[in-house]
Image (tube, rainbow, N blue to C red):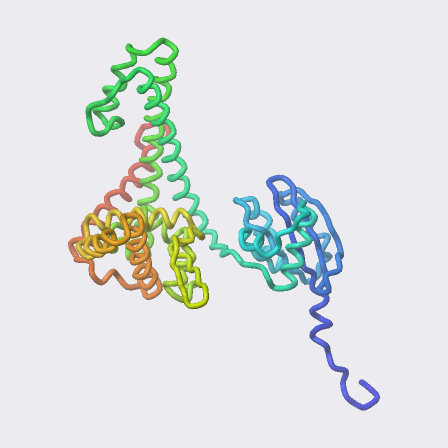
Amino acid sequence: MRADGCLPRRDNAQEVTTIWYIGIDVHKKMCNACIKDLEGNIQKELEFPNKSTGTDKLLEAIEGREAKAVIESTGNMWLRLYLGLEEAGVNVVLANPEKTKAIAEAKLKNDKVDARTLADLLRAKLIAHCYVPPESVRELRSLVRHRITITRDMTRVKNRIHAILDKYELEFSGTDMFGKAGMMWLRGITSKLTELDQFIFDAELRHVETLKSLIKEVETRIAKESAESEDVKLLMGIPGVNYYTALLLTSEIGDFSRFSSANKLVSWLGLAPRVHQSVNTIYNGRITKEGAPRVRWALVQAARSAVRWDDHYRTKYQKIKERRGDGKAIVAIAREITVPMYHMINRKEGYRFSTDSFKTEKLKKLEGESKKWAKMMEVPAGGMTA
């Protein structure tokens, strides 16, 4: 008690100064951390491996103090460290590297400087946060992205086969060269190739067959996961959105309610036009292409399909195409699909303009595909039924 009989006032600012701010520059094998206090004084700097033992080393350096940490989003290299710090009770945030770069561009750049800069931005509350979805959503993301990876592998293999065919001026007269009839034709032309090219060509054809099997397997698993998601079933009511597209959208976007409006979601997806303003002149340029490229690609593909099968979207597409061309018209349709998608997920409502027969047909197909997964699980690795 003070001399005037009053209790001493506890200064909240004094308590805050005990918090340490940690900037962490993450790499695949090693990380650099800079620990600062509220005034910006460096308390500690350390290098540690990007593994669980490295996380323990960083936690030892904190000495049990209250701490806030920031990690830049770099591939999946941040995930192990982020989860380890979060589990230990450290308030950790994931920084958007593009926006952090815009704030903290420096002529001198190395791992130590980057860690110090991140710590300073965290102290000043200038970190542009990245959304970190729960584990269940991250796993679905991995599944959907795995399918994308395999499909890209297939495209590369097909391109190599095309290169060999071009070398010998061989052309397939059918519609699908990698369908049943096309594969029979491909196997029948090996005699026209040199011995070494035959060897390479046969290997590529086997590669195609293997990838086909893997794609079928992963698509069946995606159908199984989609059948268990009410959000996916809701989005399937939108023209042009199948179960794969719907699962991609829900897993990549995650929590729709984190966007305060549909326009905010459109902006995050990079589908909003750039705005250039000078005095009284406002010019809308190309779309920003910021945000999630996979979701933007999926919405553009959905727009292509919607224009083909839905009268409302086809009419609107034709009007915009006449004035501004195909590309901008399709982007406009993708934006229009995004708005009802946002409200459907947040309100748990179906697509209002979808017919019952349209919904039933899509859901029936999803159910049939998801059942294939159960049948696949009945067959062990040896191929014999249990």
Quadrant the N terminus occupies:
bottom right
Residue at the image position 19 percent from the left and 55 percent from the top: 315
Is 344 on the left or on the right of 31, as rendered? left
Q: As displayed, is residue 309 above or below residue 161?
A: below
Say whether residue 37 is visible.
Answer: yes
Q: Position of residue 131 (x, y in %)?
A: 49, 56
Q: Residue at horizontal 38%, vertical 50%?
A: 295
Quadrant for the C terminus in the image: top left
Q: Is residue 240 above or below residue 12?
A: above
Residue 155 in percent (x, y) is at: 36, 31
Residue 363 visible from this viewpoint: no
The image position of residue 296, as x and y in percent, is: 37, 50
* Left or right of residue 24, residue 280 in this image: left
Q: Nearer the viewer, residue 120 or 14?
A: 120
Q: How many marks?
A: 0
Position in image of residue 363 (x %, y %): 23, 50
Quarter of the image holding residue 17? bottom right
- Identify which residue is drawn at 33% across, 54% down: 229
Taking depth in this image into account, of 335 and 384 the one nearest to the observer is: 335
| Residue at point 43%, 60% (across, down) | 276
* Most distant residue in the left direction: 357
303 and 381: which is toward the camera: 303
Direction from residue 217 to residue 59 in the image, left or right: right
Say left or right for 239 vs 288: left
